[in-house]
Amino acid sequence: MRRVAIVVQPGIRSFDLAVITEVWGPDRSRAGVPGFELRRCAVEPGPIPLPGGLTLAPDRGLDWLATADLIVVPALAEPADPTPGPVLAALREAHGRGVPIAALCAGAFILAEAGLLDGRRAVTHWWLAPELAARYPGILVEEAPLYVQDGGLWTSAGVASGIDLCLHLVRQAHGAEAAAAIARSMVTGPFRTGDHAQYLDRPVPAADRTAEALAAVRERALRSLHEPLSVATMAGWAGMSPRSFARHFAAATGTTPHRWLLGHRLDAARKLLERTDHPVPEVARRAGFASEVTFRQHFTSHVGLGPRAYRAASCAPAAAPNPPDSVRKGS
């Protein structure tokens, strides 16, 4: 995923455009991040009006999507606005070739209008989820996750979850170190799994001591991932019963202690596979998994590759740069 295309059209959200540009636009080679070619692709050349009095100058036509490794679709400020036919046709053609497509927030409506989400799981901002389900009953709309993937199509929830999805796509293609370097430069958290809740059903506990206790437990758990941790153990650190701790933990983080631990252990395992030559059983032990078998099962389920295959992919030499457009089109 070195060549990234943004599909631009009048009315797209400036925030989504800024997120995509910030993730894949700057040169961060000094931090070990690979170089990306980010292009803004539109039906026609010329300034494109955006909400808030802004304008955008596209630098490529829709034909550049044929050379892209990843296509990212910003949301329209008004999700009910129609998308030009050539854009929908270009998205359908790219998906047919197997190019991954990611839509941020209400960008799911654009993929739905193109007919790409029929029979697939998708997510959008929780406020818009009922509208998406009503307008496109063939889509399996989920209201809780931050982002989901189905059949090479990624959709994300509102606002900040677009950052989470973009960083996740970098992590998948180029490893946890590259994603973490980008996250550090953006001063944002480097890893939130897609199954985090979009919003909290219960407010964060008002008592400062409870909130501080939970934060201290999370910090201590991150330092102790290699140890056999249980909900009962962490509850003891917080001075709570396991049931009360699990309830407060979910209210504060939007997920269960078990899922939170698993996500951070998998993140630690990814870093060990990328940075060290430890055997897989040792990686499993250092990341806190009870057995190599359990580690392999969770890692493969969440990452899509086994530990050895992931290490081989993350350590593979960089591919030769793509030839110029004229060469690609002539081949």
Image (cartoon, grey):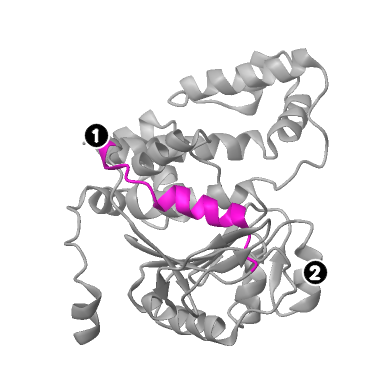
89 relative position to 140: left or right: left
Image height of 107 relative to 249, above or below = below
Residue 219 lies, with reference to residue 261, above or below; the image says above
Relative vertical location of residue 207 with respect to residue 103 in this rendering, above or below: above
- Label 1 Cα crowd, 10 Å radius (few <14 / some 14-19 / many 20+): few
Left or right for 163, reference 182: right
Question: Which residue position holds label 1?
Answer: 276
Identify the residue at image location x=25%, y=83%: 329
Q: Residue at x 76, y 17 (%)?
A: 210
In the rendered structure, which disc, 2 or 1, sits on the residue that comes first in sequence?
2
Magenta span contains residue 186: no
Q: Which residue is painted at 54% across and 47% down in the image?
A: 164
Where does the magenta region start and end?
A: 11-30
Q: Does the rendering let one see residue 207? A: yes
Above-or-below relation of 187 to 117: above
The verdict on residue 17 being magenta is yes
Q: Quadrant of residue 185?
A: top left
Horizontal and vertical percent for residue 56? 52, 63
Q: Quadrant of residue 271?
A: top left
